[in-house]
Image (cartoon, rainbow, N blue to C red):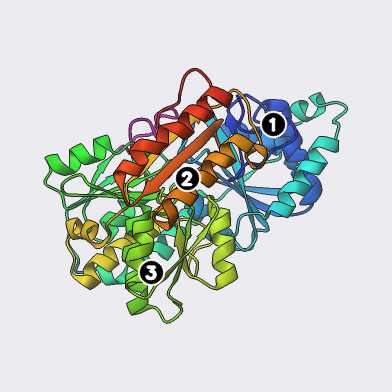
Amino acid sequence: MSSQNQQELFGTDGIRSITGKYPLDQASLIKIGFCLGELWKGAKILVGRDTRESGENIVNQLAYGLGKSTNLYCCEVIPTPGLSYVIGHSDYDYGIMITASHNPFVYNGLKLFQGNGEKTPGMLERRIEEIFFSTKLNNESEFYQEKIKQTNRVQTESQEKYEQFLVDNASELNTFKLKIVLDCANGATYRIAPELFKELDLDPIVINNQPDGRNINEKCGSTDLSHLKETVILNNADLGIAFDGDGDRVIFVDRDGFMLDGDYTLFLISNYLQKKNQLYNSMVVGTVMSNLGLEEALSQRGIELVRTSVGDKNVYREMKEINSILGGEQSGHIILKNLQKTGDGILTALFFLKALAYFRLKVEEVKKEIIPFPQAYRNIALKEKKSLSEWDELNELVAHFNNQYGKNSRVVIRYSGTEPLIRVMMESKYQNIIDENFDLFVNLIESTIGELNEIGS
């Protein structure tokens, strides 16, 4: 099942599907390239990808449609934030990142960037969809038969530009020594992250940096911390750092294997910026999934948490609206807006380390700074989609819960923008409220629109 229906291309973070399935089948990719070429005639476009085996083929299929009317440059494997940075600091007009981020290798997708390094706005995505669904390619075979115009290779130049940017933001770590384990998720950070940390004399233990095209995010990286935790504990390391497949997320673990997710990261870096950055206005953008414990801890330090919908585009849009320079999600997608236009796992890791050094904190002390409210999650596979706003029985159940349990408890129900799932999250200051109510929501949703087999929590 695709994450998009037949009248949509874009989800919450670009285009994403199982490789070979609509809209990542060959005919659709050529057509997408053709539509982008119509919009971006004469443009200079930088294309990057993560380590999935399907990436290069997708680049080629897009190029059949794009190559006639645009100038393509390819930087091969690069983290998504690296592509964003290079575009925003060079003379490229647009960028295309071929990635499915944290998803398994069978998925892939496209993230589109404007010349300033920002992701393309929803208005442009709708325009691309309009052209796509109104365009009929009379003879698609003519695209297959025509050789792709030679694509310029700019791998070294792009990597060096991005790496120098990261080095420039690590100046305070010269004398900071921790024993670190890096988990590169067999993804786009597999080369640049270990090289950077070695250049900074941080001498990390590196795992999952041997991509084979199929092992990206497989039992590793920010979505599966078991290997990282085991390695940290086995080596008596101080800190574990896990990136996702395209390097725009990062999750940390302490020496005991305790997971420090994006909430802890936002808390630590926000306190650091409050001391060190005059541009910081003591406002942090989170999402509806951000823990109430984070909100409480920030408030005690005079910092306001502003919530928005899930998705880094929504976070970034709200950051611009309220002039915040820090925002992010529990998943580890952290944006430092005065430096980057999208989440950057490596940059976030550097700021996490700088905050530890500034406050002279041990990593295991960070978890004491927040008392998280208990949360329960469930991802439910879909057999169909039902409009949440028009689902009376579910909305009545939500309203009853909110009226009964007040501001210290909440339930969040939303469709995934990248997978055929509906996500249920319940949070409360009191665990017994979750125990007594969570299954009421799960059972209603599963019995109405859920598949028989549930996809893991």
Secondary structure at badge 3 equals: helix
Q: Between tags 3 and 2, which lies in front?
A: 2
Percent of width and height locating residue 379: 46, 33
Q: Which residue is label 1 attached to?
A: 5
- List the single residue furthest toward the right: 138
**How far apart in space, not on screen, are marks 3 and 2 (Cα)?**
49 Å
Pointer 1 local density, CA inside 10 Å: few below 14, some 14–19, many at least 20: few
The segment highlighted magenta reads: 208-220
Q: Say which of 11 and 377 sits in front.
A: 377
Q: Between tags 3 and 1, which lies in front?
A: 1
Which amino acid type is marked by label 1?
A: Asn
Predominant secondary structure, magenta span: loop
**How far apart in space, not on screen, are marks 2 and 1 (Cα)?**
32 Å
Percent of width and height locating residue 339: 47, 67
- Position of residue 278 relative to residue 364, above or below, is below
- List the single residue furthest toward the top: 452
Dots 3, 1 in contact, CB < 8 A: no
**How far apart in space, not on screen, are marks 3 and 1 (Cα)?**
44 Å
Dots 3, 2 in contact, CB < 8 A: no
Pointer 2 local density, CA inside 10 Å: few below 14, some 14–19, many at least 20: some
Q: Which residue is label 2 attached to?
A: 401
- Whether residue 301 sits left or right of residue 148 in the image: it is left
Residue 408 visible, this angle: yes
Residue located 33% across and 73% down the image: 301
Q: Which residue is label 3 attached to?
A: 168
Residue located 20% across and 44% down the image: 257
Magenta stretch containing residue 354, yes or no? no
Task: Give the label on residue 329, or none.
Answer: none
Which amino acid type is marked by label 2?
A: Phe
Q: Quadrant of residue 425?
A: top left
